[in-house]
């Protein structure tokens, strides 16, 4: 199984973000052998690979990342996370699911398709980065900017993220929600707990605001996106002493939102709640991802048909989950779909992928190429 062999090779590279650790040279060598033009693009500490076969339109891009998240304590793993290990029907290792198996399947699918169709009417490319699990500043974003400056237009893109739930192909992402984070600092006055009238406890004064923010119904969602969610991720306050009223409280929070709200509307509503409760505050915002969705067209139809042919399933079309590098590609006008293995063990200890899914995923990707071209 060629996909299994390549997945093992990639897992063996300890590519903790943003370190590629030799994955991209392995990939580049394979693609070069079947006719791809290779460009290695390094931006600061991030390695990126742009590989293209053909010069004609339409351009179909497979996008992915070689970097992985930290392993955590090695003692928690049943085997070395960077020594791919087969146990029963699964392959274990960091990146097995997210997303080295997806990368391997895309590469083998492209090799097989080109071998059978060397003069197909269009182009295939790979956009691979080592900066997806990190800040995502010098990876796909920078490569897309370069392609845009060269007027190299992507028509269709499949991101190999782990999107399936219970069975391979039961779910694909056709968009992603936006991600808006905030850091709220509520100002009070430090003092002795025995003399509260001489202090102003910001924990107490912000309690009502926290309650209102968590109970607010921000929207009802729409046909493409679920309702907007608000979550507090961190609260920091106090000096560590039991007899000191703190002078400030810091509250980190995040919105995941669709297209029914804009960033400006969310910010206005949050500010209105804060001002209504007469808080003395400072608020900093960071919008790290805009929402996007791909309308039903040639790519979604090709993905649906390919999954049904190989697995017999009718995939659920979803915009849930976290963010992905698809958010940098979709604004160019490309149709973007995310499709990969089951995601239940992504970022977990003992991350794994079902071995039998590797061949099926390769067949699905190859069938998609046949449907597009």
Image (spheres, rainbow, N blue to C red):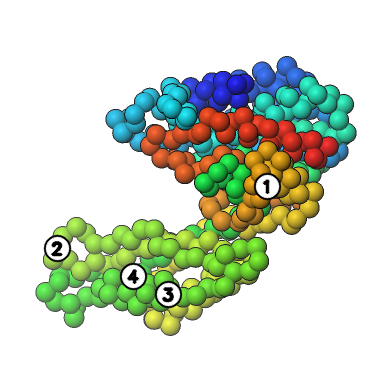
Give the distance between the C-alpha atoms of the residues marked 2 and 1, in whole angstroms.
52 Å
Rendered image quadrant of residue 78: top left
Mark before the other along the chain sequence, 3 or 4? 4
Q: Quadrant of the N terminus?
A: top right
Look at mark 1 in the image and give the residue it sits on.
Answer: 337
Taking the spot 34% from the left edge, 31% from the top edge, the residue there is: 77
Rendered image quadrant of residue 72: top left
Q: Nearer the viewer, mark 2 or mark 4?
A: 2
Look at mark 4 in the image and give the residue it sits on.
Answer: 187
Secondary structure category for the residue under label 4: strand
Disc 1 crowd rating (10 Å Cα; few below 14, some 14-19, many 20+) is many
Look at mark 2 in the image and give the residue it sits on.
Answer: 242
Secondary structure category for the residue under label 2: loop
Give the distance between the C-alpha atoms of the residues marked 2 and 4, in whole angstroms.
19 Å
Q: Nearer the viewer, mark 3 or mark 1?
A: 1
Look at mark 3 in the image and give the residue it sits on.
Answer: 215
Mark before the other along the chain sequence, 2 or 4? 4
The image position of residue 61, as x and y in percent, is: 73, 37
Rendered image quadrant of residue 38: top right
Disc 4 crowd rating (10 Å Cα; few below 14, some 14-19, many 20+) is many
Seen from the viewer's position, the closer of residues 241 and 111 is: 111
Position above or below: 93 against 157: above
Seen from the viewer's position, the closer of residues 283 and 56 is: 56
Mark before the other along the chain sequence, 3 or 1? 3
Q: Which mark is residue 296?
A: none
């Amino acid at each position: 199984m060629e996909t299994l062999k390549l997945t093992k090779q990639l897992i063996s590279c300890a590519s903790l973000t943003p370190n590629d650790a030799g994955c991209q040279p392995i990939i580049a060598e394979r693609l070069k052998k079947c006719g791809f033009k290779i460009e290695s693009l390094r931006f600061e500490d991030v390695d990126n690979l742009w590989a293209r076969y053909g010069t004609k339109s339409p351009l179909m891009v497979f996008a992915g990342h070689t970097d992985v998240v930290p392993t955590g304590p090695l003692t928690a793993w049943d085997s070395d996370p960077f020594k791919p290990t087969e146990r029963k029907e699964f392959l274990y290792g960091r990146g097995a699911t997210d997303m080295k198996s997806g990368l391997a399947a895309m590469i083998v699918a492209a090799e097989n398709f080109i071998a059978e169709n060397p003069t197909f009417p269009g182009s295939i490319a790979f956009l691979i980065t080592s900066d997806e699990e990190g800040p995502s500043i010098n990876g796909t974003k920078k490569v897309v900017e370069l392609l845009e400056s060269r007027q190299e237009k992507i028509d269709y893109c499949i991101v190999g993220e782990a999107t399936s739930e219970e069975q391979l192909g039961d779910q694909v992402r056709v968009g992603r929600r936006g991600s808006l984070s905030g850091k709220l600092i509520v100002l009070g006055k430090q003092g002795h707990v025995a003399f509260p009238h001489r202090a102003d406890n910001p924990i107490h004064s912000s309690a009502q605001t926290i309650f209102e923010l968590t109970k607010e119904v921000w929207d009802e969602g729409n046909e493409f996106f679920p309702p907007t969610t608000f979550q507090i991720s961190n609260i920091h306050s106090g000096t560590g002493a039991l007899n000191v009223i703190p002078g400030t409280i810091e509250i980190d929070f995040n919105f995941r939102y669709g297209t029914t709200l804009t960033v400006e509307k969310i910010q206005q509503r949050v500010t209105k709640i804060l001002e209504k409760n007469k808080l003395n505050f400072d608020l900093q915002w960071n919008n790290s991802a805009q929402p996007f969705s791909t309308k039903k067209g040639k790519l979604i139809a090709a993905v649906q048909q390919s999954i049904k042919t190989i697995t017999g399933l009718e995939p659920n079309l979803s915009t849930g989950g976290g963010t992905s590098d698809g958010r940098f590609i979709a604004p160019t006008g490309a149709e973007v779909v995310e499709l990969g293995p089951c995601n239940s063990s992504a970022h977990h200890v003992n991350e794994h992928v079902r071995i039998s899914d590797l061949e099926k995923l390769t067949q699905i990707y190859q069938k998609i190429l046949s449907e597009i071209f």
